[in-house]
Each structure stands twice: as C-alpha cells, then as structure tokens.
Image (spheres, rainbow, N blue to C red):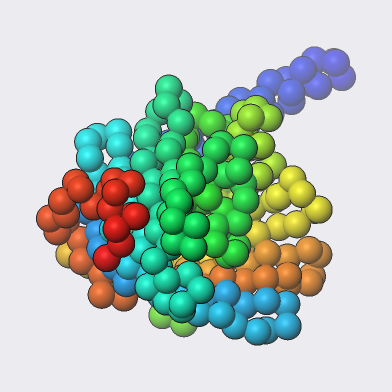
Amino acid sequence: MKKLLLVTLSALLGASSALAADQARSIMDKADARDDGASMVSTMQMTLIDKNNKQRIRQMRTFSKDIDANTEHKTIFFLSPSDVKNTSFLTYDYSGDDKDDDQWMYLPALKKTKRIPASDKDAAFMGSDFSYSDMTDKELDDYSYTLLGESTIKRTQGEEQVWKIEALPVNQAVIDETGYTKSILYVRKDNYVLTRAKFYLKKASRIKYMDVRKMEEIDGIWVAMQTTMTTKQGSQTLHKTILTNSAVTVNTAIDDDMFTIRAIEKGL
C-alpha cells in the first residue's frame, strides 16, 4: 500500500509539473507574440552608476524595424559625450534557431566596424549592465519554462499583477552565449509585457536584476520608458544601468538603408 501511495504521489507531481510547464510556455508564447509595433524611433539616455554612486550619462538615438515576420533590425547611434560620440551599433535579430543573430559595432576612433561573435555576446554592452545578448530577443525554444506562481508588484503608479516563471537554458551553448544559468521572469497579466526579471550569471555568482520602472501605452503599443539593470554579488551592488526613453514614435516609416553597415559608419 505504501509503495502504491508513493507511485500515485509521484504521478500526481509529474502531472502537476507538466501542467506548470505547459502553462508557462503558453504565457511566454503570448508575451512573444504581443504587438510591439512594426517600427520604433526614440531618444534614449543611458545612465551608468558604479559602486561608489558615480554617474556617467550617454545620449543615444535608436531605430528599429520589422523587416519581415521573422527579422527585426535595430540601430543605435551614440550622440554624446565626446568619448562615445559617433559610436554606432547594428543588430539583425532573427527568429528561429536556424540562423544566429548578427551584430556589428562601429568604433570611430579606429574607423572600423567590428562584428560581435557569438562567443562575446555575454560581454557588457558599452560598459553597461546589459550584455550584447540582451540587445536581441531570446528564442523561446532555447529554454524550458515552469510557472512558479503569481505575484503582485507594487509601483508608485499602482499595482501590477504578474506571473512568475522560471526559464532554464536547454543546453550549455545557450548558457555560454547569454552568460545566464537561470532566469526568473515576471510577466504582466494585463498586457503580457516582461516587467521584471532576475538573471543568474555563470560568472562569480552574480545576479542581475532587471526592472521596468515606467511603461507607457503609445498608439496602442506598450513601451518601456525607464528600465534598470542592476548587477549584485550577494547584497552588494556592483553596478547599475538606467535606460530612459523619450520622444518615442511607433509604426513610423524608416528607410531600410538605416540598418546597414554603411549607415552606422556614416552616422546621423
């Protein structure tokens, strides 16, 4: 009887686990499929804060456009300060595992465009807490998902009801490219936007905390207006990055020539 009880309990736990995985994947599918606009243009401020609370501020102009159902192109032009002015970044973000995303960085001091290899995509993007991998969308099939439960995030503008989901890389190659061994994702129930995340780094037992502090609906599209990424080791904050969007326009016409190596080398 005891053995039968254990077998039954094991079967119930297995069924519960499978249900949690199915529910989590369904939520992530809807988050991935939500309308984020066919194009977007914005002015962005990047604030870098070190462990001594010293700040550096960078101004950027960003452009993104859906080229087709499976391809998005993004360009970032650094406008100031002088040490990063005219630096530019170009990404070709492909959906599906059959083709790796392409990324290039133009370095004006060297007058050279550098392609970012997959082995470097876990590195910091322009000294920030965001990596090159963070600059592209994650492939859903690269992870297994489990619904951990539901939660409430309290904001100054109100409460957000969210699902809490664990995402585990399916293989070591995904870990090596992203630098993350595990992620805890918080997806809003009302609009399926990822509003908070916790990323466990493979290096030095560090954790990165992403938080969308401010979000606005612009012409029917939800846009993150202020996002923070904080790197911690234990309770110690090592570094923090704040990205603040302004002058955002969505679904506006952008010439495909904006998303070329020639464009990033030419600058705005």
In the figure, is residue 223 to the left or right of 7? left
- Residue occupying the point 38% across, 40% down: 93
Q: Nearer the viewer, residue 48 or 237?
A: 48
In the figure, is residue 222 to the left or right of 174? left
Q: Examine the image and state in which quarter residue 108 appears.
A: bottom left
Q: Is residue 100 above or below residue 131?
A: above
Q: Quadrant of the N terminus?
A: top right
Q: Position of residue 199 (x, y in %)?
A: 64, 52
- Residue occupying the point 36% across, 63% down: 77
Q: Nearer the viewer, residue 67 or 75?
A: 75
Q: How many marks?
A: 0
Q: Quadrant of the C terminus?
A: bottom left
- Residue occupying the point 62% across, 77% down: 49
Q: Is residue 267 above or below residue 93?
A: below
Q: Position of residue 248 (x, y in %)?
A: 25, 69
- Residue 177 appears in the picture as rendered: yes
User: In the orientation shown, which residue stands out farthest toward the right?
Assistant: 2
Q: Position of residue 63 (x, y in %)?
A: 28, 58
- Residue 244 appears in the picture as rendered: no
Q: Position of residue 203 (x, y in %)?
A: 77, 49
Q: Examine the image and state in which quarter residue 61 appears.
A: bottom left
In the figure, is residue 63 to the left or right of 188? left
User: In the orientation shown, which residue stands out farthest toward the left?
Assistant: 253
Q: Is residue 39 above or below residue 5?
A: below
